Image (cartoon, rainbow, N blue to C red):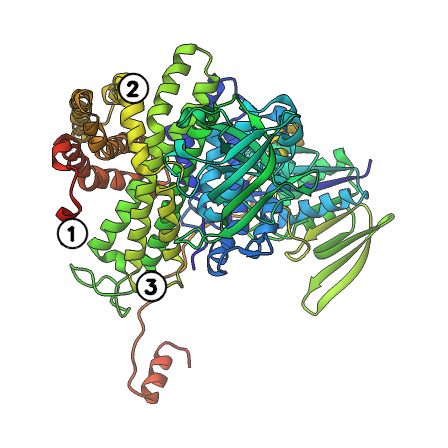
Amino acid sequence: MYEYRAPRRDIRFVLHEVLEVEKVLAAGGREDVNRELIDSILDEGARFAENVLSPLNWQGDWHGGPRLENGRVSTPPGFREAYRQFCTDGWAGMAADPAIGGQGLPDVAYIAVGEMLCASAMAWRMCSGLSEGAVLALSRHGSAELQARFLGRMVTGEWTGTMCLTEPHSGTDLGIMRTKAEPQADGSFRITGTKIYISWGEHDMADNIVHLVLAKLPDAPSGTRGISLFLVPKLLDGRPNGVSCASLEHKLGIHGSPTCVMNFEGAQGWLVGQPNGGLACMFTMMNHARLGVGLQGLGLSERALQASIAFAYERLQGRAPRGALERDKMADPIIVHPDVRRMILTQKAMTEGQRLLCFYAYLLIDVEQHAPDEGTRKRAAELVALLVPIVKSFLTDWAVENTALAVQVHGGAGYVRDTGVEQYYRDAKIACIYEGTNGIQALDLLGRKVLGTAGQSVKTMIDEIAALLKSDLPADFAPWAQRLQGLLAQWAELTKTVAERSAKDPEELAAAATDYLNFCGYVLVAWCWLRMARVAKRALEAGSGERAFYEGKLVAARFYFERVLPRADAHAAGARAGAAGIPMLQREQLEA
Amino acid sequence: MRRIMVCVKRVVDYNVRIRVKPDGTGVVLDGVKMSVNPFDEIALEEALRIKERGEADEVVAVSIGPDDAQQQLRTALAMGADRAILVKTTDVVEPLAAAQVFLTLVQKEQPQLVILGKQAIDDDAAQTGQMLAALWDRPQATFASKVELAGAAALVTREVDAGLETIEVDLPAVVTTDLRLNEPRYVKLPDIMKAKKKPLDVVELASTGVSAGETLKSVLVEPPKPRSKGVMVKDVAGLVDALKKKGLL
C-alpha cells in the first residue's frame, strides 16, 4: 500500500518557473498572493492530504463504502473526522469569495491544493468539490434571500451541496427529464421526482445537505429550454423536507463516495435564477466542474506514477539486457528493463505535461476574471472555453491509461489488491463518464467551441503556441520546434476540412469529434513540454544544483516528442477519415 | 507582559533524502525543501498552548539565518505566533554564536520563558539551549516531555535514561523540547492568509554585536560507504579465518 506524497516540487516548477503566476496574479491586482504565500498554502495542503486523507483512500474502498440503513447513510471510518478537520482548518471555503466568508484564493492556487485532495482521496474529495460548485452557482444566481439563508453555512462546510440532474431515463439528454416543480402561494415550489447517480446525496458528514435540482415548471416548454434550477434542502429548520435516499449504487470504483438514488416527494424548494433558465445556471459552473474532473484525472495519474516509480526501483526481477547491474543481488530492479522505462516515462510525460496544461487553464480563469484590460480578459475567456473540454476529456482518458500502466508495471502485484494500485485504475474510469461524457466533451469542443466561433478560438490558441516557437529557443530544440510548427499547420488545415464537411453534413462533425479532441490534446501537451524543457535547459545551464530534477524533465520531453506525440498523427488521420467509414449499421452487420 | 520566546531554525525537511556534494564540502541544498526544525515546531506548539491556557500574553518566534528563513517564521506566525524576528546572516552560525545572538534578543524582549527544540535535525548539536541558559545565567530544563507553569516557576518533566524526571525551575528559564511533548497542530488556511500581515522584523547579524565565523573546521563530508558484497565461507573454520584476517577476532 503506497501513501501519497504531494508533488510539491513539480507543482512549484509549474506555478513559479513555467507559468510565473506571481506576475500574472499581480497584474490582476492580486499582489497579496505571492510566491511565499502560495508555497505556504502548498505545504499545509500537502500536509493535510498526505497525513489525513491519504490513509482514508484505501479504507473507503476496502471497507465496502458507505452504508444505507433506515434512510441514513454512514460513511467509511475516518471520513467524518477528516471532513470536520477540513472545515475547521478553513479549506472548505478556500475558493469562495471573502464577501461570503471564503478565503478568496485565486483559481490557480486553489487547484494546486485541489490536485492533492483528489489524488489523496478522490471519493472523499468529491463531497467538498460538489459543495464548492453549489456555492458558486448559488452565489451567482441565487436570490439575496436564498444566499443569506444558505450560503454562509455552505462556505464553512457545515452544510454540503449536490447537483441533481440525472434521472433513470434522462442522462446526457436532460431535455426529457420528468421531475416536476409546482408553484406554491408563498413563492416556493413543491418538487417531485426521482434523481439518480447523486454523489453524496445523503451522508453523515454534515448537518444538512443543500440539493440543487433541475426540474420542470408546469408550463415549461419541452426540451432543454424548459428546465429550471431549484434549491431543495434535506432539512428545513431541522425538520425532514420530503427528500430521501432510496438506495445506494454498487459500482466499479470510488467506493468511498455514496452514489444515491434520491426521491423528492413534494419537497419544498426555491427557484434559483430565471424560470426555464436552469441550464444557463448550470453553465456558469460548468467550466469549474469540468476542469475539476480533469483535475481528478491528473491526481490519479500522479498517484499511479509515484507507485510505478517506487515499485520499479524495489522489485528485483531479471537482468539488464546489457548484463547484470547489481551482481550481488539475485536480480536487477525492474527499472533496468527498457519496456518498464517506456511505461514509466509514458506516465511521467503525460502526467507532468498535463499538469501544466491543466494549471494553465485555471490560470486563464484568473486572467479572465481579473486582468485589467478587456482585450486580455476576452482572449483568456476564449481560451478557457476551448481548453475546458480538452482538459476534462484528455486528462481523464489518460488517467485510465496511466493507472492501467501502473497496474502493468506492478504485474500480478498490481492486479491483486494489496498494493492498492488497482483501486486507482477502478477509480479513474468514472471521470471519463460524469460531468458530461468524454464523447459529449468532444462534441462541445468541435461544435460549440471550434466551429461555433468559426475557428477563431483555435486560431488564438495556435497564435499563442506560435509565439513560443518564435521566441529564443535553444538550438538543439529545433527538431521539436519544427515538429510542433508542422502540427500547428495541420491543426489549422484539419479544422478547415472538418468545418467544410460539417457545414454540409452534421454527421461529419460528430464522426470527427473525439479524434479531433485527442489531436488537440497531444499538440497542447507538446507545447507544454517545449515550455518546460526550455525552463529546465536554462536552469541546467545556470548551474542549478537540482540537476536530476531538470535532467528528468529533458528526458521526459524527448520521450514525449519521440514516443507519445506520434499518436497525434493517428488521431489526425481518424478525424480526417470522415463519416463514411463509420456508417449507421444494421445490428447483424456487427454481430457474428 | 508575560512573553514566551521560541527559537526556530530553518533546516532541510525531514522527508528529504540527503545527498552529499561531490566535492565533500557539505550536503546539496539547491532546490531542497526546507522546513521548520521539527523539535522547534514542538517548542512553538507548547508556547501556543501555554498562551491559549491564559498563562502567557505573547509568543515571539525568532530565527537566525538567510533571508529565506522568513518563510519558516511565516509558518510560525501562521501557527499562531504573534510576531517574529529574523537575525539575518548567510554565515555559518554555530551553537555558541546562536546562543549569543538569542541572548541579545532575550535581553531586549525580556521573556519569562524561552523554548527551543532540544536539537536541530541538520547538525544535531543539541547545545544552543544549554549555552543560552548559561550565558543568561538562568535555569534550564532540557528534553522536556511535559511543561506546567506554576506562578513564578515551571514544573518540567524530562526524558532521561532512567525514565522520567520532574524538576522545578524558577522563571525566567530555558526549556528545550523532546519529541513526545506534544503534537504540533495543523495550520488553518485563514491563518496562513493572516500571517502575512503579522509583524516580522529583520535585523542584520552585525547589529547584535555577535560575529558568527566558524570556530570548528569542517574537514570532509562523506556519504556512508555502500555495503560491500558478501563473501561465502565453506565452514566454521573458514569463518574464523576470515574474521581473524579482518582483525575482528
- Callout 2: residue from which chain? A
Image quadrant containing the N terminus of chain A: bottom left
- Sequence-wise, the earlier of marks 2 and 3 is 3
Find disc 2 in the rendering and name its residue.
A452
User: Relative to A528, is A562 on the left or the right?
Assistant: left
- Relative depth, front residue between A366 and A510: A510
Foreground label between 2 and 3: 2
Residue A478 coordinates in the image, percent (x, y):
17, 28
Q: Pointer 2: residues within 10 angstroms few (<14), some, or many (20+)?
A: some
- Callout 3: residue from which chain? A
Q: Are marks 1 and 3 on the same chain?
A: yes
Three-letter code, disc 3? Ala
- Relative depth, front residue between A182 and A303: A182
As measured in the structure, the alpha-carbon distance from the residue carrying label 2 to the one carrying label 3 is 48 Å
Find disc 3 in the rendering and name its residue.
A413
Compared with B161, A27 (above or below) is above
Foreground label between 1 and 2: 1
- Circle number at residue A591: 1
Three-letter code, disc 1? Glu
- Sequence-wise, the earlier of marks 1 and 2 is 2
Could you say whether the residue bearing mark 2 is in a helix, strand or loop?
Answer: helix
User: Relative to A379, is A346 on the left or the right?
Assistant: left
- Callout 1: residue from which chain? A
- Circle number at residue A526: none
